[in-house]
Image: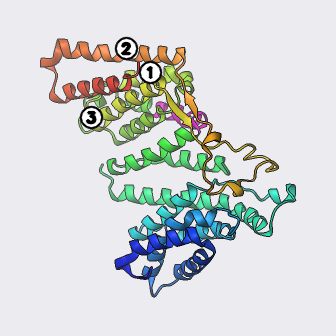
Amino acid sequence: MSIFNEDYIEDAAKACQYLSILRPELIVPPIMKKLFLSIDNITEPGRFTLIMKCLPGIICQIVRQTSNYSEGQTYVLTLMMSILPCIDSNDFEKIAVTLEVLDAILKLVPCIDCSSAIHTRNDLTEIEKRVCLSTTQFEDFITDFLNRIFQMISIRSAEMFDDAVANDIIHQKIIKFLTGSLFSSKVRKFVAGLVRVIIKVNPIEILKYLLPQTCEHIENIMNNSQTAILMDHKGDIELTWHLVLFSELVRARGDTLLIYKQMIMSVFHQCIRIVHKDSYEAIAKAAKHLLKSLSDLYSIDDQLSLENMDESFVDCLPIRAWGQHVDFDQLQVQYHFPTVDEIDFACEFVNTFIYAELQLLNEKCLNLSKEERLRSLTLIHYIAVGCLRM
């Protein structure tokens, strides 16, 4: 059995995973050597893909320090930077395996520049010093990675157009990308997933930069079109995108949404009667997300607490935590508990919109078009789902 035998690659990957757990010092170095040789191998491009399929199973052994093997950490940044060029829209399989490997690494490795630790600690081994110095590349990695992903999304959208370190860099690039682009219906869900992640990680900053701008775009479109856009079954792609973005932004923690209450309510008042299917589904989902954010009990931080992670590294060195198992006794889960103000906001929202829709259906159901009835029922359904915990 060989990792280069395509018929048995899954079995080979499993074997590499189990063997790396037993003897990482014998398994990791030769696989990494073969990988680096295969990256620039033009004559046999398939070798790279096959080796990459074996990597996710051994990533934990690469990034983790143990008493028997810690040299694997020296490969981490070199590996991440080396495979970045493989995010190329011309080869989908290569993209898939590259993203799978990066996903496996980034789940275990926080992107923190630890290079200053070599000046503040005197207990570092030579390997740890090399690893700490290599972490200066995290900023370049993040910048290049985001550029490549955004470029792929932009190309894909154009093809289907149908009518902890460097946080500031990440925020600026994502915000510029989201506010400066329009996306087709087939691409919106992927971009929405990106917004969903960043709004959970840093809701205060993301809302500050994105929500007012998004609401302003929506209101400008509605004001300029007067009432015509409400009954336009073809819809407006710019409006639909900003409504999708709006629906993801209101997933933020309830307490972070309170200061934007008037702005949020204004968008709902203006857009609640749109009959274009994609648009009213976006506004209905926004209602559900808003109510869940305001009224649900949910975890907001389930990471292992690492003190001074971004500070001097005197008490805690992040590279020593790479890939380590979680001690459940030290796991400090933070929860969101709805406040009185959040519950009041949720109740006001429900009273304002759901009863108006019920009254509309009760009094004018026969006079409404099929699309208008479906819009109203969709909104009622999503509001009801959103306030199940109230």
Mark 2 to mark 3 CA distance (whole Å): 22 Å
* View extreme (bottom): residue: 43
Determine if residue 372 is in view.
Answer: yes
- Secondary structure under tag 1 reads helix
The numbered disc on residue 352 is 2
Q: Whole-percent x and y of residue 346?
A: 44, 18
Q: Which residues are magenta?
A: 202-217
Query: What amino acid type should be assigned to the residue bearing mark 1?
Result: Met
- Mark 3 and mark 1 residues within 8 Å of each other at the beta carbon: no
> Magenta includes 213?
yes
- Secondary structure under tag 2 reads helix
Mark closest to the chain's N terminus, 1 or 2 = 1
* View extreme (left): residue: 366
Query: What amino acid type should be assigned to the residue bearing mark 2?
Result: Thr
Residue linked to disc 3: 276
Query: What amino acid type should be assigned to the residue bearing mark 3?
Result: His
Q: Quadrant of the C terminus?
A: top left
- Secondary structure under tag 3 reads loop
The numbered disc on residue 265 is 1
As drawn, 353 above or below 111: above
The image shows a total of numbered marks equal to: 3
The residue under the point 53% across, 39% down is 199
